[in-house]
Amino acid sequence: MELALTLNGAPRTATIDGRMLLVDALRDTFRCTGPKTGCLTGDCGACTVRLDGRIVKSCLTLAAAVDGAEVRTLEGLAEDGVLTPLQESFWNAHAFQCGYCLSGMLFAAEDLLERNPVPTDDEIREAISGNLCRCTGYDAIVAAVRAVVA
Ligand code: FES
Ligand code: FES
């Protein structure tokens, strides 16, 4: 099928297999490798993107289902090479090591701060709880989000 979407602000089209997962279309067809393939069962959050503003796990979404939609990946966060305050804070707090969880963590934190600009630590932990980090132990991630709030 023909797929047309807006990806990180730019119109993109491709011919895809109708059974293709969104994460595979993003990585293999559109070469956006920010979303990672981890569990492929919706549990780890490594494949997280924003779909028409909503956080979705792209391993649980068919590419065909996003025809006409707006998708934002990790690559779409910084503008003209300028990191967002959250990205800057993650960098400063050493809140990632391998970076595999970064899409899920950053989008979850961004979504939280849009809904709740002054969250408590418990609310930060709740917001990122759908994402698994294999490296950091989570404390640095919470500290990075807290620093943006401050
Ligand atoms: S790869 Fe999608 S949630 Fe783990
Ligand atoms: S930094 Fe490696 S999984 Fe989070």
Image: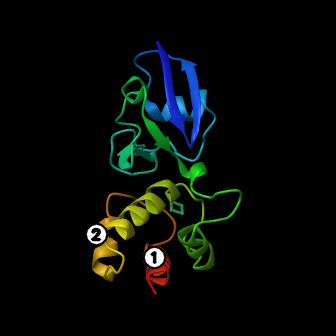
State the residue at coordinates (49%, 57%): 101
Question: Which residue is at the far top?
Answer: 1
Judge whether 46 appears above or below 133 on screen: above
Question: Which residue is at the far bottom?
Answer: 150
Say which amino acid is labelled 2. Glu
Q: Which residue position holds label 1?
A: 145
Q: Is mark 1 on a helix, strand or loop?
A: helix
Where, by quadrant of the figure, is residue 42 drawn? Answer: top left
For label 2, the crowd category at 10 Å Cα-Cα, with few meaning under 14, some 14 to 19 and many 20 or more, is few
Is disc 2 in contact with disc 1, using a CB cutoff of under 8 Å? no
Asked whether 71 or 124 is in front, the reply is 71
For label 1, the crowd category at 10 Å Cα-Cα, with few meaning under 14, some 14 to 19 and many 20 or more, is many
State the residue at coordinates (70%, 56%): 80
Asked whether 139 or 108 is in front, the reply is 108
Seen in the image, is 91 located left or right of residue 133?
Answer: right
Say which amino acid is labelled 1. Val
Seen in the image, is 140 located left or right of residue 117?
Answer: right
Judge whether 58 appears above or below 19 on screen: below
Q: Residue 47: where, in percent of width, then height?
A: 45, 45
Q: Which residue position holds label 2?
A: 126
Find residue 84 and name its label: none
